[in-house]
Amino acid sequence: MIMAEKIVPLTGNYAIAEAMRQINPEVVAAYPITPQSSIVEMFSQFVSDGKVDTEMVRVESEHSAMSAVVGASLTGVRAMTATCSAGLALMWEIAGVASGLRCPIVMAIANRAISAPINIHCDHSDTMGARDLSWIQIYCENAQEAYETMFLALKLAEHKDVQLPVMVCEDGFITSHCVQNVKIYDDHVMRNFVGERKSVDNLFNFENPIAMGSIELQDYYFETKRQQQQAMSRALKVYLEVGNELSKVTGNDYGYVESYKMDDAEVAIITMSSSAGTTKTVVDRMREEGKKVGLIKLRLYRPFPHGEIRRSFKGIKAIGVLERAFAYGANAPLLSDVKSAIYELSEKPKLQSYVFGMGGRDLLEEHVEHAFNELLAGKTVKEEKYLGLRE
Amino acid sequence: MTEKFPTNEQLKNKVGWKEKPIGGAVTRTASALENKTGSWRAFRPIIDEKKCINCAFCSAYCPDNAIPFKDGKREDVNLEYCKGCGICSKVCPVKAIEMKEESEFHK
Ligand code: SF4
Ligand code: SF4
């Protein structure tokens, strides 16, 4: 068989829809919300054109979308959806049901701010708010990564040791609506890679009937939640295994992080999604000036790879944590995770929290350069700093 | 007959998190029999046998299968499982079921 790879100009959303076409899930239920809408618009086009066998359920809200995919997933089939921002907020109740009932649903997210004030542009407030819902979260830098991550996410979700839902996150508009060249792999190769879902205990297994969604009170709920914690820690291992398998198809790496020019770095920035691209450009330029700067791009945010983060920052003088979300009244989300990861290092790097890009505010190269220069000068403070904010 | 919340001692004898089916799946059939929902009841359905036309509606609608219907005949309410929701009383076409305060039976 010929590996008919092709390069196609696609938005992040169309790249994700293309992955969904190749996966050909049994059920997709979705409700439109900017900037996610074009994922499911394109996917429903595939459904009308007969390019997939999917049952497309057009529902009246995201609460119903998540309910429908949970119901479908419990019958043992593949069920997918996509959302962001207010849509994710409306799914909240059932998103907890999805992970609690161990449904391996893959949901694409085009990250968007949370109202109010109303804002349709990118920040990570939506998924950061959902970080403790027992969903795996993977953040993608660009359209190519978003496309490939969909396949990884599906196999990770369905792995017998995991069986948890996954959010595949791309930056709203920045990635979701910008056209990039995306390498699309052959349909057969990708369908072979994902194979069929092998579900044993499900509502359509009439030889071993089960009931799902029963009440558990003081007697059993705690045990069920402890199992989710175990599945999350297993997901760390399975993520790498599935990543290695996918590497054989694409030739790309799927580590917890992408380490960029870190070998002899004195200071480093850690960030997620599209801001990693901007940071790479700045790293390249500052390296030419002889400045020892590097980047850790975090892909897998939940479960959080504490060990990998600790190893990555050993011997680094100062770390700038650049993130697109507030944790109001506390350390910003990524900062608190990085802080707890480096706690066990005997020589702790200095840390600086930088919040940027709320509501789609641009992160400019000079913002990143400014952060690197502060880190190089040892100008770190306990307080959160802001990039691109008018004082 | 009132069911108490489980004691620490009783909880200890239940299956641990490593053995339990994941996702709260119930893998045995008819396990609801072990959950005697009668202890929840604040109202008790009292059926007026003279009015009853034996239509089986109450039996079919009862969410806890607490009104048996055997050999074409409605039987007495099983108070171990009747949780007092009043659905039977609502659906009875001849209004033969009256919901009475449970406390009246404990005087
Ligand atoms: S009150 Fe509710 S639970 Fe009791 S017999 Fe009637 S329908 Fe069943
Ligand atoms: S619904 Fe009313 S009439 Fe019908 S069987 Fe029950 S009590 Fe009798």
Image (cartoon, coloured by chain):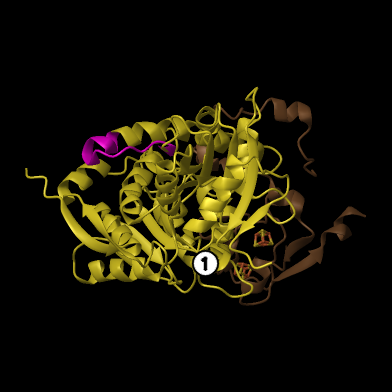
Chain colours: A yellow, B brown
Residue A245 x, y percent position in the rendering: 28, 34
Quadrant location of residue B52?
A: bottom right
- The percent position of residue B42, horizontal first and vertical second, equals 79, 59
Q: Is residue B6 above or below residue A35?
A: above
Residue at far front of view: A289
Sort mark 1 into few (<14), some (14-19) or many (20+) by Cα contacts within 10 Å.
many
* A267, A207: nearer the viewer: A267
- Is A249 magenta? The answer is yes
Q: Please state which amino acid type lies under the numbered disc 1.
A: Gly
Quarter of the image with the N terminus of chain A is top left
Which residue is at the front of the view, A254 or A267?
Answer: A267
In the image, the segment drawn in magenta is A245-259
Q: Quadrant of ligand 1?
A: bottom right
Q: Residue at x 27, y 43 (%)?
A: A194
Q: Give the residue displayed 48% in from the left and 31% down from the top.
A: A234
Q: Is residue B94 left or right of residue A295?
A: right
Q: Which residue is mark 1?
A: A360
Residue A236 screen position, x and y as percent = 47, 33
Q: Is residue B65 visible?
A: no
Q: Residue at x 73, y 44 (%)?
A: A382
User: Is residue B55 positioned above or below A170 on the image?
Assistant: below
Q: Is residue B89 located in the magenta-colored stretch of the structure? A: no
Q: Residue furthest left?
A: A1
The subunit letter for the residue under badge 1 reads A
- The quarter holding residue A28 reads bottom left
The C terminus of chain A lies in which quarter of the figure?
bottom right
